[in-house]
Image (cartoon, grey):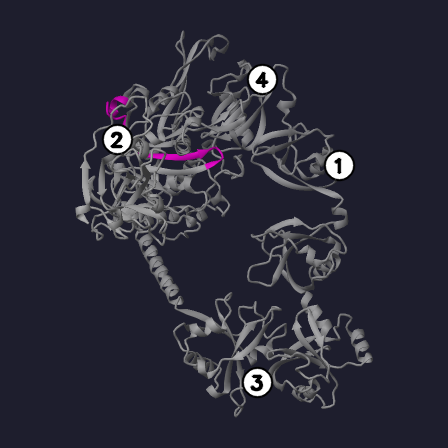
């Protein structure tokens, strides 16, 4: 074969510029054109090498079914072409061609791979412009060492003209196969990786965090804090030896940090979020990282007080900035110095991070109509701005990617390009003075440590982090549970934002368009810089001695317990359960069937090994019931088409040596994980197997006087015997006189209980083995009448009893309101056909109240919490009351909630419950009130109902105001004539006594709305309120009145930043203590904003998002 092939290898030259005119047909030998056309270079990757190889085949028909071409080397790797002239995989109509790695299949590195872009071409040997080609890219590995095209070209057309020029691909057995191969560098090790069985620990040395649903924002921040080693050590210094992980944020965070350092697999955060007091819903809500960081650090700072970690957060993250207003023409300056934990920087209008800092400290001139009122100097031209006094060792920079757009009246994401450097000098933004001189010229130089990224838009997306763990370390990408190496391009360029303008996308290919869309919406939103002088102590490695011993012991114990559970699970894979129902169980059963298949405690459970023989299992059963082997017989149990469970056949001696696994496969039910059997207790000397004419039936007895059903036992009958033949046997079994008249019924299924004819044979009655016959005494009409007189609810016949059992239901009535946990739950047996009034009467007997003073509420799925109030309808059946209710998993009880009413439910349903929160002397004095008012009432009725319940100020206005608030925003102030039917359930209603200074204000004074917000003016929370702007009063004095109105401590009040929002939020200015608001030209929609963390968990979020809270 070697004599039939010529090899041609040429080194590719760099790409040269070609004339714009393109020939109609291009030659395979025009390598540069072929490269551009078939495998255009991926500019996001670094090319290692690109060459071409040609395999000259002289005799096509002489080739074997599978042929490998000569080896060639490109990019430092050996390759060959793998050819199937007659096709591969039973495909004999298409030529199959592959690029095959010729490297040894046994590689010392289990992660060995090569990333290649390639094209394979087959061409006419005399005219290389006649060719067929296909191209691909692939990550070649030991497991996927060849890649190419099973359907390359049609075998039957190889020697036919390829196009209208008349030349074939194979000319008299001669053809040329060309491979153009481009090998890429893969510095991250994951280029084109499918991430199947990817191991973060072995590839990078680090592990990720599991995403609970929408906790990627939290994961990215936690990884950043974990690699801030000084912070990690401070968290370990918090005493937690006696804490419970689910209730202690400190301990739960310690566990996460320890597991991130020691685990081989990704770490879960469920226990951490549980310690926050979050439920599963919070785990499916994305939150703002800056807000989460502030709330978490605020929580930890409190836990660190009085411990070795006290002051760590202040030392790491807190800097100082000064807000000032300085007069130009007089010697007067007003300033305020305050701490900051992070800095929010504008992206819009700023091309670089340096530009953002310049924008932050930009000076505003106050002149003209906007002159500053300087105490003692009147109106003056002034300079207003902010300057930094100190920067912290670890600088958290929040890039304002999400902003309020006043024109759209909505939040939008800013995707503009915004560049940030690896190193930055912030000295120019620091005020001169002793502090700056003490730090020195290098004290404000910072190095990038982390980039937290958001990919998506305002309504959702994904978060991940790019971090450099140590001074000399490489960069890594932490994307939830996956950690990979990152290139500098991934760290910087790919997170600047921008991308092609939207109008340019139309002219791109779909793949490029999708890539640019992704780039456009993927950008940095938080940067972490570390002061160069502080890198060594901030990133000093955490040692074993820094980790609390109790934490190591606790987690080691948990690891051992987890390993034991894993071992038990592995062992359980070799076993399965067998449920054995015996004669004892049948006799004790008082319901349908042989036993209750829904009852987990029914019968006895045997855990057996799959490999055990049935004979071994049989011995175990005999021993358990303390019987000799010859006195038990084990039957299979089957589920019939009518959904009943009956015995089928006894397992024969021929299967005693079979494995239990084969017994289960042959006799079990596929839908069940367990095998079900019935063990029959034999009388001594009874033959071991019944004949084909024998039927084993089961007998139940019903006593109408006690309304009890019981299993009597088994009975063998012959098919030809008459039903009446067993009456004497049944009388004997129950100790009745032999001539007692009986009624017999067959229990076919719960809703089908058929009377049996005494003169018919069992065969005529269609009785099979395993069937159930129920009997009772045949009552005379007088006995039936007397029974009814004694008990109106009596069930004289078997049919009536079974109908009762079919409709029988047990309902758990739980208290809807049970603040002290003392009100009981009542389990009451009822009929599904019971009416609303009958249900209320049954519960009323337990509660000792009037049935009309009970209200029912359904339970929701899947939580089981109260959901919808059930409107009273006298004939509403219980089954409908429960139709949308909650059924506890694995239990037969349904759930309804009850509430005892002070008034009749008839009266209640003509009224409306209005919930109003009364605000006392301060805004923190809240007291809720439930007011039951006629649905036709006006707001005046709320005032009248409230007055006896609240205490007005002795010298107050004695006038009430009612407002409707939604997510911290005042939506409506009601007049006394507004009907309560207009109240929205979405609003929280507040009532307060109108302050006297507001009612008695002068003509030149006005009341301004004040509202709380966090970070962004649109993210409101708390209760809005009004304050009077007094003539000539400084804002510092007004703040004293605001603090008194809020009832806040001096410490908490000091954390509030005040701003004046004008023009619907379009103009926002910070307020200083010496500002005089009465001199400011204001509009009706202007408000004073109070910027501080919402600790209530009730704040205004987008969509379903709620304010972050951490309770643990």
Q: What element carries label 3?
A: loop
Determine which quarter of the picture holds residue 235.
top left
Q: In this view, does 171 lie to the left or right of 284?
A: left
Q: Is residue 1096 left or right of residue 878?
A: left
Judged by depth in the image, the label closer to the viewer, 2 or 1, is 2
Q: Residue at x 74, y 59 (%)?
A: 835
Q: How far apart are marks 4 and 2 (CA)?
A: 73 Å
Q: Mark 3 points at which residue?
A: 692
The reply to whether dot 1 and dot 4 touch (C-beta < 8 Å) is no
Q: How many marks?
A: 4
* Frontmost residue, 472 versus 149: 149
The answer to which of marks 4 and 3 sits earlier in the sequence is: 3
Residue stretch rendered in magenta on the structure: 436-460
Judged by depth in the image, the label closer to the viewer, 3 or 2, is 2
* Frontmost residue, 931 versus 113: 113
Q: In this view, does 1057 lie to the left or right of 409?
A: left
Residue 1083, disc? 4
Q: Is mark 2 on a helix, strand or loop?
A: loop
Residue 319 counted in the magenta span: no
The answer to which of marks 3 and 2 sits earlier in the sequence is: 2
Determine which quarter of the picture holds residue 154.
top left
Judged by depth in the image, the label closer to the viewer, 3 or 1, is 3
How far across and how far down the image is residue 379, in percent? 48, 9
Q: Mark 1 points at which residue?
A: 937
Q: Taking 653 as reference, is 243 above or below it?
A: above
């Amino acid at each position: 074969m070697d004599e039939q092939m010529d090899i041609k290898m040429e080194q590719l030259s760099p790409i040269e510029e070609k004339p714009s005119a393109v020939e109609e047909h291009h030659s395979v030998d025009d390598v540069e054109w072929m490269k551009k056309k078939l495998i255009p270079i991926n500019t996001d990757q670094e090319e290692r090498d690109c060459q071409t190889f040609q395999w000259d085949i002289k005799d096509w028909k002489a080739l074997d079914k599978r042929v490998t071409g000569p080896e060639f080397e490109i990019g430092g790797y050996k390759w060959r072409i793998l050819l199937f002239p007659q096709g591969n995989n039973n495909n004999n109509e298409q030529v199959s061609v592959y690029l095959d790695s010729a490297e040894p299949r046994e590689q010392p590195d289990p992660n060995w791979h090569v990333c290649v872009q390639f094209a394979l071409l087959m061409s006419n040997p005399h005219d290389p412009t006649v060719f067929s080609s296909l191209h691909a890219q692939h990550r070649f590995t030991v497991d996927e060492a060849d890649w190419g095209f099973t359907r390359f070209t049609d075998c039957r057309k190889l020697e036919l003209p390829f196009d209208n020029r008349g030349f074939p691909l194979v000319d008299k057995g001669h053809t040329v196969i060309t491979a153009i191969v481009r090998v890429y560098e893969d510095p991250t090790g994951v280029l084109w990786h499918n991430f199947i069985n990817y191991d973060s620990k072995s590839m990078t040395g680090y592990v990720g965090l599991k995403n609970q649903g929408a906790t990627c924002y939290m994961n990215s921040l936690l990884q950043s804090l974990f690699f801030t080693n000084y912070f990690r050590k401070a968290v370990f210094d918090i005493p937690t030896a006696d804490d419970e992980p689910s209730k202690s944020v400190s301990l739960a965070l310690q566990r996460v940090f320890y597991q991130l350092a020691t685990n081989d697999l990704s770490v879960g955060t469920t226990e951490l979020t549980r310690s926050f007091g979050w439920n599963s819903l919070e785990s499916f809500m994305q939150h703002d990282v800056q807000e989460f960081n502030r709330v978490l650090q605020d929580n930890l700072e409190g836990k660190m007080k009085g411990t070795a970690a006290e002051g760590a957060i202040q030392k790491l993250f807190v800097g100082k900035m000064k807000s000032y207003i300085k007069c130009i023409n007089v010697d007067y300056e007003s300033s305020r110095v305050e701490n900051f934990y992070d800095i929010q920087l504008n992206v819009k209008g700023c091309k670089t991070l340096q530009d953002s800092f310049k924008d932050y400290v930009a000076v505003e001139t106050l002149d003209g109509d906007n002159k500053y009122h300087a105490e003692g100097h009147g109106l003056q031209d002034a300079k207003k701005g902010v300057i930094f006094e100190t920067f912290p060792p670890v600088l958290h920079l929040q890039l304002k990617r999400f902003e309020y757009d006043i024109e759209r009246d909505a939040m939008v994401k800013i995707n503009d390009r915004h560049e940030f450097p690896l190193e930055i000098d912030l000295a120019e933004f620091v005020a001169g003075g002793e502090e700056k001189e003490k730090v020195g010229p290098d004290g404000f130089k910072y190095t990038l440590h982390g980039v937290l990224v958001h990919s998506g838009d305002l309504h959702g997306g994904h978060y991940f982090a790019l971090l450099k763990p140590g001074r000399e370390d490489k960069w890594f990408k932490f994307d939830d549970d996956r950690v990979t190496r990152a290139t500098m391009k991934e760290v910087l360029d790919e997170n600047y934002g921008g991308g092609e303008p939207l109008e340019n996308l139309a002219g791109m290919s779909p793949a490029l368009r999708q890539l640019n869309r992704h780039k456009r919406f993927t950008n940095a939103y938080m940067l972490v810089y570390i002061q160069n002088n502080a890198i060594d102590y901030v990133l000093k490695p955490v040692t074993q001695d820094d980790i609390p011993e109790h934490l190591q012991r606790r987690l080691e114990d948990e690891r051992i317990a987890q390993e034991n559970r894993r071992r038990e699970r592995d062992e359980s894979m070799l076993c399965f359960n067998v449920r054995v129902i015996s004669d004892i169980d049948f006799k004790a059963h008082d319901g349908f069937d042989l036993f209750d298949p829904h009852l987990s405690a029914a019968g006895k459970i045997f855990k057996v090994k799959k490999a055990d023989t049935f004979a071994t299992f049989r011995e175990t059963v005999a021993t358990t019931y303390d019987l000799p082997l010859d006195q038990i017989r084990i039957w299979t149990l089957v589920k019939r088409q009518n959904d009943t469970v009956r015995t089928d056949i006894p397992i024969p001696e021929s299967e005693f040596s079979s494995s239990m696994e084969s017994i289960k496969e042959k006799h079990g039910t596929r839908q069940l994980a367990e095998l079900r059997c019935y063990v029959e207790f034999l009388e001594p000397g009874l033959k071991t197997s019944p004949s084909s004419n024998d039927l084993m039936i089961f007998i139940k007895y019903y006593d109408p006087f006690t309304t009890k059903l019981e299993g009597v036992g088994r009975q063998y009958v012959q098919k030809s015997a008459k039903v009446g033949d067993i009456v004497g046997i049944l009388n004997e079994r129950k100790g009745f006189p032999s001539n007692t008249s009986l009624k017999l019924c067959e229990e076919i299924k719960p809703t089908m209980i058929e009377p049996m004819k005494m003169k018919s044979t069992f065969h005529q009655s269609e009785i099979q083995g395993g069937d159930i016959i129920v009997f009772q005494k045949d009552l005379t009409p007088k006995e039936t009448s007397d029974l009814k007189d004694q008990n109106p609810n009596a069930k004289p016949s078997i049919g009536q009893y079974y109908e009762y059992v079919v409709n029988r239901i047990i309902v758990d009535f739980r208290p809807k309101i049970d603040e002290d946990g003392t009100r009981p739950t009542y389990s009451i047996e009822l009929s599904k056909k019971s009416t609303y009034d009958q249900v209320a009467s049954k519960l009323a007997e337990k509660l000792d109240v009037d049935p009309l003073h009970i209200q029912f509420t359904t339970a929701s799925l899947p939580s089981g919490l109260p959901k919808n109030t059930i409107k009273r309808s006298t004939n509403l059946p219980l089954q409908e009351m429960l139709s949308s209710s909650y059924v506890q998993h694995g239990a037969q009880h349904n759930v309804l909630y009850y509430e005892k009413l002070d008034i009749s439910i008839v009266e209640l349903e003509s009224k409306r419950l209005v919930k109003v929160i009364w605000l006392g002397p301060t805004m923190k004095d809240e007291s809720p009130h439930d007011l039951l008012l006629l649905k036709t009432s006006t707001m005046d009725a709320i005032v009248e109902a409230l007055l006896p319940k609240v205490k007005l100020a002795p010298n107050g206005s004695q006038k009430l105001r009612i407002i409707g608030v939604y997510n911290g925003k005042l939506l409506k102030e009601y007049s006394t004539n507004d009907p309560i039917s207009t109240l929205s359930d979405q609003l929280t209603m507040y009532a307060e006594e109108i302050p006297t200074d507001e009612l008695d204000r002068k003509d030149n004074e006005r009341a301004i709305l004040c509202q709380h917000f966090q970070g962004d003016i649109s993210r409101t929370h708390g209760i809005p309120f009004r304050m009077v702007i007094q003539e000539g009063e400084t804002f510092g004095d007004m703040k004293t009145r605001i603090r008194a109105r809020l009832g806040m401590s001096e410490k908490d009040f000091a954390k509030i930043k005040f701003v004046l929002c004008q023009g619907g939020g379009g103009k926002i200015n910070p307020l200083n203590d010496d500002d005089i608001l009465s001199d400011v030209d204001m509009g009706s929609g202007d408000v004073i904003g109070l910027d501080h963390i919402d600790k209530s968990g009730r704040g205004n979020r987008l969509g379903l998002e709620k304010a972050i809270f951490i309770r643990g």
